[in-house]
Amino acid sequence: MNSSAKQAMIKVKSTKTKLIPSKLIPSPQDSASAGKSNIRCSGFCPRCNEQHSLPAEPARQSCLELMTRLEYRQRIDLDSTPDRAEPCFSTKYLFGPARGKMFGILIADTPDNKRVELRAFSGQYNGVWQVAGWVGPVFDLTTFHKIHDHRERKIKTAGKQIDALEKGAQQQKLIAKRKKMSQQLMRDIHDMYRIKNFQGESAGLQQLFQQISLTGRGIPTGTGDCCAPKLLQHAVQHNLTPLSLAEFYWGRTNASATRRHGCFYPSCEAKCSLLVGFMLCGLGD
Ligand SMILES: [Zn+2]
Ligand SMILES: [Zn+2]
């Protein structure tokens, strides 16, 4: 096991319940819309033609403790001492223009029967994929930078050239060229996401979203970047057996007002259902 994997794995130290400030406990109204029983992590498995799921408890309890820590520390680099805290990991970021994001905890058993907790945030945190103490993305970060960085620069340069040009044939040509570059980059990034399951299989996003692709809707942006797939992928890669998974939202309400600060939500339907269904096959109930 490498060091980042160790960092991402937090041993469950005690089962003592800590006091949670009352304002952090979702109100009855929130509980009705995202109640305890419906916040489980689940997905549709095309192989079994049914839902597979993991219970939210006891991970939900661990999430409440994480909320308390986020509330008091006001940052996500929780393993760093205050003098080494990075400004970019402050939770202020979640209450600004970028708005909040989902956080999640997976409780799992190691092959030698030790109980561990893994935590994840959705997508990038302030432009950063990997933060100590949190699981990383489902793809290999070195490969990502190799595929992404130089082409992203090219696309940006093309954008500047387009802005500098007068409207006309030459500008149109460059716009078309940039679009092609972006689409190819997106496809190559999607190809990097190899979703693994606990039966030793792996699948690409194109494969999992085949049906949806046929309708012409395409794979939703950010697929594979939610907490649930990140946590389950990390568990597969490190031979852990997942027991429970819960996800909550932290920060300024999202633009569509479907996510509120301190509330729990089930794994999302649009992006995660097919991924989670595939990942949990043969494992959950
Ligand atoms: Zn999701
Ligand atoms: Zn199945």
Image (cartoon, rainbow, N blue to C red):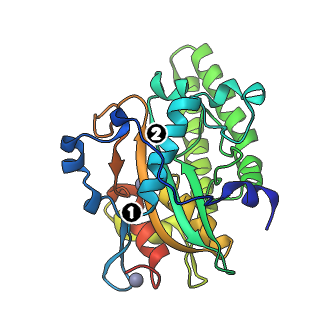
Q: What's the residue at 61%, 65% (across, down)?
A: 116
Query: Would you say the beta carbon of the disc 2 residue lies within 8 angstroms of ligand 1?
Result: no
Q: What's the residue at 61%, 83% (across, down)?
A: 200
Q: Is 7 above or below relative to 96?
A: below
Q: What's the residue at 56%, 58% (across, down)?
A: 230
**Circle 2: element type:** strand
Residue 60 spot, x, y in % from top left: 41, 56
Residue most extreme to the front = 16
Residue 55 spot, x, y in % from top left: 38, 68
Query: Are there few (<14), some (14-19), or many (20+) residues within 10 Å of tag 1?
Result: many
Query: Are there few (<14), some (14-19), or many (20+) residues within 10 Å of tag 2?
Result: many
Looking at the rendered image, the disc whose residue lies closer to the viewer, 2 or 1, is: 1
Q: Is 59 above or below relative to 115?
A: above
Q: Amino acid at mark 2?
A: Lys
Q: What's the residue at 73%, 54% (across, down)?
A: 7
Residue 155 spot, x, y in % from top left: 65, 34
Q: Amino acid at mark 1?
A: Ala
| Picture disc at residue 106 | none
Asked where in the image residue 110 lies, by quadrant, the reply is bottom right
Residue hosting label 2: 101
Residue hosting label 1: 56
Taking the image as shown, residue 76 lies to the left or right of residue 71, namely: right
**Circle 1: element type:** loop
Q: Is 244 above or below relative to 230?
A: below
Q: Earlier in the sequence, mark 2 or mark 1?
A: 1
Taking the image as shown, residue 115 lies to the left or right of residue 248, namely: right
The mark tally for this picture is 2
Report how far apart the C-alphas of labels 2 and 1 lie in the structure.
18 Å
Residue 114 spot, x, y in % from top left: 65, 73
Taking the image as shown, residue 246 lies to the left or right of residue 8, namely: left
Asked where in the image residue 211 lies, by quadrant, the reply is bottom left
